[in-house]
Image: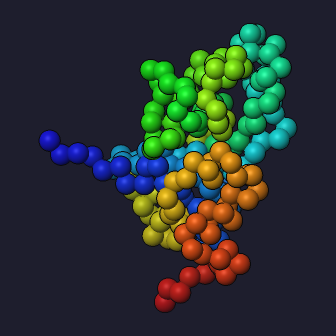
Amino acid sequence: MKRKKKFLSGKFLIASPAMMDPRFHKSVIYMITHKNEGAMGIVINQPIIETKIKNIIDNEELKNNSNIDNIPITYGGPVDTKKGFILHTKEFKDETTIEVADKIFLTSNINILKSIVKGHGPKKTLFALGYAGWFAGQLEEELTQDGWLVAPGDSNLIFECKAEKKWEEAIKSIGINPDFLNSSSGKC
């Protein structure tokens, strides 16, 4: 049986200055899955400041819990923006949890929020609304157009680094000084 390649799963896509889509300007995307059929990732560095979780969920038990206000919300991408996704550490797992890489998991259901507000959830989390998605071949084309740089995934960058520093730190992680980047490459 032939195993499917995971390609960029568990890695970061870093928007280069050549990225033409303004929705992804200086974005860092943590790749959840990347297969021949397409790809999915979560933008990890675009906080949504004007929205609180209690304003977007219907669960009364959670709405009335003051711990819910301490969970920051990030714009995860332009696809399915009404759906929440939580990147987290290993302390929570249920039947819907996906292990993306060592130490990094993804869960997308109300049970993880209930666990978090009761103090039984994962130690570190990043809550995102929506995701970035690509159909078969689309991401590969964007990579050939110099829209993205690729870096190894790193739980510290996801959970510890401040949102406004993540793009710069991701660039530095691959040995590039962000001050030297420009939007035109050396192609002839």
* Image: 40 above or below 91: below
Is residue 173 or residue 13 the one in the foreground?
173
Residue farthest along the bottom direction in this orientation: 188
Residue 131 falls left or right of residue 165:
left
Which residue is painted at 23% across and 45% down in the image?
3
Q: Measuring 80% from the left and 16% from the top, which residue is drawn there?
A: 65
Residue nearest the observer in this picture, 21 or 93: 93
> Would residue 179 appear left or right of 103 to someone viewing this image?
right
Instruction: Give the number of callouts.
Output: 0
Q: Quadrant of the N terminus?
A: top left
Give the x, y percent position of residue 112: 60, 22
Estimate the x, y position of residue 145 in percent, counting from the top left: 50, 71
Rendering quarter of residue 166: bottom right
Q: Is residue 81 visible?
A: no
Q: What residue sits 54% from the left and 69% below the top?
A: 174
Indicate the position of residue 162 as horizontal and vertical percent values: 75, 52
How far across and how far down the image is residue 52, in percent? Answer: 80, 30
Colour approach in the figure: rainbow
User: Which of the 4 image quarters holds residue 15?
Assistant: bottom right
Q: Is residue 186 above or below residue 118?
A: below
